[in-house]
Amino acid sequence: MPTARAVEPVPELLELWATSRAYLPGKGPVPGLRDAAFAAFREVGFPTTRAEAWKYTNVVPWVNRPLRLPPRDVPGTDRITAWFAGGVKARRLIFVNGHLLPELAHVGGLPGGVTVRGLGRLLQEEPDRVADALAELDEPRGLTALNTAFASAGAWIELQDGAALDEPLQLLFLTTATADSVLCNLRNVVRLGRAARLHLIETHVALGDAKPLSNVVSQVRLGEGAELRQDRVEIGAAPAALIERSRTVIAAGGRLCRTVATLGYGLSRHEQGVRIVGAGAEALLNGVFTPTGKEHVDTQIRVEHAAPSCHSNQFYKGVVDGRSHAVFAGKILVERAAQKTDAYQSNNNLLLSDEAEIDSKPELEIYADDVKCSHGATIGELDPAALFYLRSRGLPAALARSLLIFGWAEEVLERMADEATRLQARRAFLARLPGGAVLGEP
Amino acid sequence: MTALLEIRDLAVSVDGKTILDEFELVVGAGEVHAVMGPNGSGKSTLAYVLAGREGYQVTRGTIRFLGRDLLTLEPEERAAAGLFLAMQYPVEIPGVANMYFLRQAMNAIRKARGEPDISAADFMKRLRAQAELVGVPPELLKRDLNAGFSGGEKKRNEILQLLMLEPRLAVLDETDSGLDIDALRTVAEGVNRLRSPERAMLVITHYQRLLDYIVPDRVHVLVDGRIRRSGGKELALELEAEGYAAFQPKPAEPATAAA
Amino acid sequence: MATALDTVREYTGHEYKYGWVTDIESEVAPKGLDEATIRMISAKKDEPAWLTDWRLEAYRRWLTMEEPRWQKVTYPPIDYQAISYYAAPKQKERPKSLDEIDPEIRKTYDKLGIPIREQEVLAGVAVDYVFDSVSVATTFKNKLKELGVVFCSISEAVQEHPELVRRYLGSVVPQGDNFFAALNSAVFTDGSFVYVPKGVRCPMELSTYFRINAAETGQFERTLIIADSGSYVSYLEGCTAPQRDENQLHAAVVELIALDDAEIKYSTVQNWYPGDAEGRGGIYNFVTKRGACRGRNSKISWTQVETGSAITWKYPSCILQGDNSVGEFYSVAVTNNHQQADTGTKMIHIGKNTRSRIVAKGISAGRSDSTYRGLVRVLKSAEGARNHTQCDSMLIGDRCGAHTVPYIEVRNPTAKCEHEATTSKISDDQLFYCRSRGISEEDAVALVVNGFCREVMDELPMEFAVEARKLLAISLEGSVG
């Protein structure tokens, strides 16, 4: 029975399920898993603002509407190559409108112990393994259940113990102008064995005036001493919606460094759960969100410390302009076992417009006494003293202002490991920034 | 002369590892002793064992202070008995004003000795005079205890406490570290002012330079947990010239020692 | 030698000093709540019809509401029909002078250290004494009257100043504001009323002392303070209750109104019975406190030292409506054994250049949980609003929890909000340092904790700061020092 907190899906979605169910990839246990997931989705429904995690984001109009599964559409190669990142040697998987384009994939000749595959094929070839992995995320959440029911594309990345990929691996997710009302359910699985190393680049791009919905679920597991660097950029046109939920589990001595730049999408919701289960591990989560126009950005972070002597840091900045609405909710949970935890969180925001809105909720939940945990959040306008200083050095007011805003965001962008991604993010940011063009290429 | 402090056959271990062994030291009233040694020789362990810090297991031996068995006393009882340790790393206590703390400490010690509390006026009078002496500015007295103090300020503040509490035995643990020459001189002047026939000092240091200003009666060389040699003040100069190498115990297997 | 944690454990098991019961004949209403109960309470107080209707309206709203569940506390369901909503010492009529007060009641307050007298210890403080459901005495009334300051029980105010009560009652906390406020609006029995006229600076501290005595009753007091233009008042409440194995409900509502250039300073030293070491008994302290800075340049400052109650659920708040108005919240919440506290504040910035400051210190020991929950909301109209929030938690031992849940919502770009939070513990180094200077372990813990809370303690009126410090040490004795 649907709970009071949920919204019943529109009939078109039920119909979509009924008509497409038989054609979704996956043998063996997969169809059963999909059926169960859809049943769970029906039970839980879409979240409403009455749920604490969705308090500031009304997702219903974005998700509960007639949607269709993605048609195949290959844009011209020039439109794709513009979004390449990671340098000339980078490995790459390209997804357009929710489909993997195998002919454009560049994952051949990988070093030993490194597997990079599309989920669609794997669902057919190794359904048991994939089903086991998908079942790992079984909490009753509407959008995750919907993803499990429909998931037919995504990246399956596996590094055995000690394996490493020296070049970055880019996952490029693109939606095109023809993708109106398209529902892309992408599912990524990343598993790093003991001491494995990977530099992952995620590029999300929405082109044109279409109004697609990308519903992404990612599951990441870092083995002992494994290291994952992850740069992620989201550059999308205003009608498009990108909702991602990721869950990362880090074993002892593992290290995660993730930097996210949100530079578009009408709705961008990024929910990250990071659970540290082994001693001496580290999680660094950086991010910048820059909504403008009528965009809505919602970042939800939950870092769980379940093991002693670990370090985590959330470093998030916001530049909130136009009539946009930004939400940041970050939580640090320190369980009893996690003594000697060192956990920090900061969320600093620039609110640039009368019509914009920012809601920040930095949260601590601490059950161990020998820990160092702190958080800070600020919301304000540009520092008048800094503005004056620049102007006294001869910069026109508008330029000084742009420069300061740029510097504000740059503090996060410079934490990206991949230069090309950093440049893409910078360019996209400058294009959105009033007077940004004046600054030119920094 | 009666011994103020008498340490006999002391062995101390930390986490099962022996730090001090067969340690002997007798300090008489009115004397200033210096214990010198390289890093890791057990200097700070000596200081902490005397003050009664947790985590230092006395596995053998005795310490008598003014005829009492020091090892049975809690840290605050040792303070009340007249022992003071000027710490190498004084602790920060936010929200507790420096002078408020000092008054609490003074009165706690007085109470333990059956003396009445010091009056606010007397306390302030003494505090002002002594603070000026060791160069602790008035605003530092009002600030939270050690919070945000520079290294030099912390050390001066320790000496201020020493002057205010007037212990029978002052143990100075690396009081010279992190001090410039002017500060060193001020601190030494403060300590010297306290020298008297009833009092004794135990100056623990790596370098000889503090001993230029606080001239010791006896110098002991502590290496690898034991006193290797004792002598007059000239021993400090000898150490300065030749270093501690001559006092290193002979390694059993040179190959592993080199690694 | 003991570590900080051992010290804490060692001192566990201190006794609640105020846990005795006064043997006095009381009139206690039968258990249960319906419209008849409310009419009975209203009739007892000889209330005008509008107030009876107001109560009934609240009751009807309450019936449709759900008990809040979002707070981070757990307790078994409360049976609202198993509570008696009215308990009062039997007396023919309210004594005309302080001399006529029942000797048993007088003894009660003597024993609590706040004798019903206009002299000596409390020379600078006027006190309203509330015993179970009724106010039994108010001191210095006449002296205050000379200045036009009204300080009396709210029941008396309903009779003597109906126009003020009618105008302001429920104007800050409406009947249907929340579940417990609605319940209070339906059944409130007594509490204090203060009116400070234009331009008057109230020359003494006003104080109410709440005492729950009867068993199986709830206390539902209602306090209303109005500071007219240019006036100032400092008000303090204290509270204790007997030690019982059953939980007792205390659901109060406090409304403050500050007009132009007025200032209200409201301090609470909350020491309701916290329950025993196993978590048996104790008060459920579910309280709605809100102040409205209606006028320009007005100021409302809340200071609370929360050491008691089995469960605390309260968020003293400020609605900063007048331009340049200021809201402050200073809080120390100490939880020990099985206590749970979910407390904080809301600062709603509406007027231009409104400022708010929040300093919250939480200390958790034993198996307790302490949560700071706060909201800073800057509306579009609040040009130039400023907020600074500092939340610090201290954990003592590894069986307790400390949580910080702030919400910051900003809709004006000229606003500036800053929030900081830290978590720490008493370190063994700090204790050793104090002890090596001659301070006992117990005192050292108290010293460090007092230092941790100093910013808040400094906000308390002088007369109560000493008491609060002692109380803090005692509460921590059960677990700290």
Image: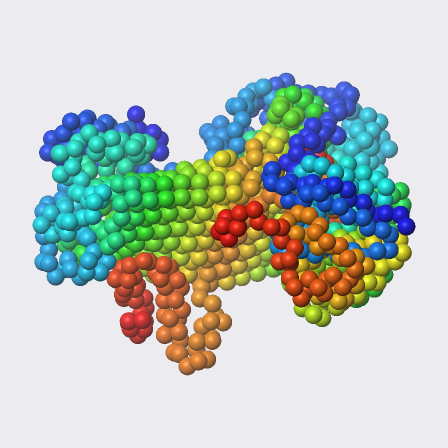
Answer with left or right where residue C319 lies relative to residue A297.
right
Residue at 77% from the left image edge and 42% from the top image edge: B8
Residue at 89% from the left image edge and 53% from the top image edge: B198
Q: Quick check: B50 above or below C478?
A: below
Q: Quadrant of the N terminus of chain A?
A: top left
Q: Which image quarter: residue C161? A: top right
User: Who is closer to the viewer here, B256 or C250?
Assistant: B256
Residue at 28% from the left image edge and 37% from the top image edge: A144
Instruction: Find residue A208 and report its horizontal and vertical position in percent.
Output: 17, 57
Q: Quick check: C183 above or below A93?
A: above
Answer with left or right where residue C86 lies relative to residue A6.
right
Residue extending furthest toward the bottom? A394
Instruction: Find residue A320 and report its horizontal and vertical position in percent.
Output: 37, 59
Instruction: Find residue A56 and report its horizontal and vertical position in percent.
Output: 38, 46
Answer with left or right where residue C350 lies relative to residue B196.
left
**Colour treatment of the image:** rainbow
Residue at 70% from the left image edge and 38% from the top image edge: B58
User: Who is closer to the viewer here, A261 or A10?
Assistant: A261
Residue C378 seen in render: no
User: Who is closer to the viewer here, A316 or B226?
Assistant: B226
Q: Quick check: C434 above or below A406?
A: above
User: Who is closer to the viewer here, C206 or C57?
Assistant: C206
Q: How many labels does the image show?
A: 0
Q: In which quarter of the image is the C terminus of chain A?
A: bottom left
Instruction: Find residue A153 and report its horizontal and vertical position in percent.
Output: 17, 42
